[in-house]
Image: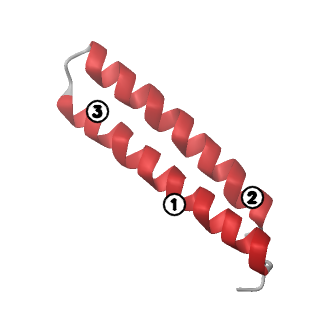
Amino acid sequence: MGEFTDKVAAAGNKVAGNVKEAVGKATDNDKLVAEGQAQQVKGAGQDVKGSVKGALGDNI
């Protein structure tokens, strides 16, 4: 995947994770809160991966 693809996937995971976390807090569902937080961390990792690809090129 290229830099742009990684950054788009990252944004999607961050948004979805944020929604899951909010819904989990609103419904007092600790499992959903944890899933949301994990998905946000995954998105942050994808964002870093995209940034590295942008700096070093897609062929890493």
Q: CA distance from mark 3 to mark 2?
A: 26 Å
Mark toward the start of the polypeptide (2 vs 1): 2
**Which residue extends farthest bottom?**
60
Does the CB distance between marks 2 and 1 fall below 8 Å? Answer: no
Query: At 80% from the left edge and 79% from the top edge, which residue is drawn?
Result: 57
Q: Quadrant of the N terminus?
A: bottom right
Question: SS at mark 3?
Answer: helix
Mark toward the start of the polypeptide (3 vs 2): 2
Does the CB distance between marks 3 and 2 fall below 8 Å? Answer: no
Q: CA distance from mark 3 to mark 1?
A: 20 Å
For label 3, the residue is 32
Give the amino acid at mark 1: Gly
Q: Position of residue 34 (x, y in %)?
A: 27, 40
Give the amino acid at mark 2: Thr
Asked if 59 appears above or below 2 in the picture, the reply is: below
Q: Is residue 50 rendered to the left or right of residue 38?
A: right
Q: Position of residue 24 (x, y in %)?
A: 29, 24
Within 10 Å of the Cα at label 3, are there few (<14), some (14-19), or many (20+) other Cα atoms?
Answer: some
Give the label, 3 or 1, closer to the camera: 1
Quadrant location of residue 29? top left
Q: Which mark is residue 45?
A: 1
Quadrant location of residue 23? top left
Asked if 4 appears above or below 36 in the picture, the reply is: below
Query: At 36% from the left edge and 29% from the top edge, which residue is drawn?
Result: 21
Q: CA distance from mark 2 to mark 1?
A: 13 Å
Q: How many marks?
A: 3
Query: At 52% from the left edge and 53% from the top edge, which residue is drawn?
Result: 44
Mark toward the start of the polypeptide (3 vs 1): 3
